[in-house]
Amino acid sequence: MDAAVLAEEVIHAWQRGAPWGELSTLKRYERRRRFDNSAMLGLMKGFKVLFGSHDPALTLVRNLGMSGMNQVVPLKRVLMRQATGERGRLPLTLPLNQAVANAAGDPPH
């Protein structure tokens, strides 16, 4: 998802006639990805603690939590969308041919 959002921001800068590598373009990309990337990092750190522990109580809590989450389909769906990057403001999908054709021409004025 990061690459798709970065590509979209670069294309938007190019369409505005702005230098695509300017800091404001990269800041827009950073703002769009910050929340999802931070959430995923937190989730992965949590998994590392849960699955890296040999504490029987933590193992029990982990197993009960994973089993319970598997039973709560809406929660499972949200977590799966987060893990696959399908949450938040998603990049627009441009057909490859259109993107290539646009990139070959002059930016709109």
Image: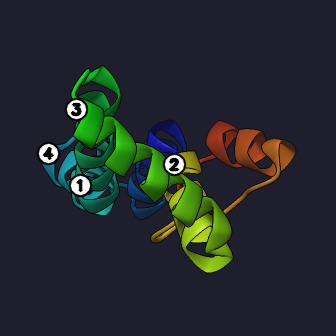
Q: How crowded is mark 3: few (under 14 residues within 10 Å), some or many (20 or more)?
A: few
- Mark 4 or 2: in front is 2
Distance of label 4 from label 2 (alpha carbons) = 28 Å
Mark found first going from the N terminus, 1 or 4: 4
Q: Marks 1 and 2: which is nearer the front?
A: 2
User: From the viewer's perspective, is residue 96 above or below residue 12?
Assistant: above
Marks 3 and 2 in Cβ contact (< 8 Å): no
Seen from the viewer's position, the closer of residues 54 and 80 is: 54
- Tell me the tag on residue 34: 1
Which residue type carries mark 3?
A: Val
List the residue tagged with mark 3: 49
Residue type, numbered disc 4:
Leu
Callout 3: SS: helix
Circle 2: residue type: Ala
**Circle number at residue 83:** 2
Indicate whether 1 appears above or below 33.
above
Q: Nearer the viewer, mark 1 or mark 4?
A: 1
Label at residue 23: 4
Distance Cα–Cα, label 4 vs label 3: 36 Å
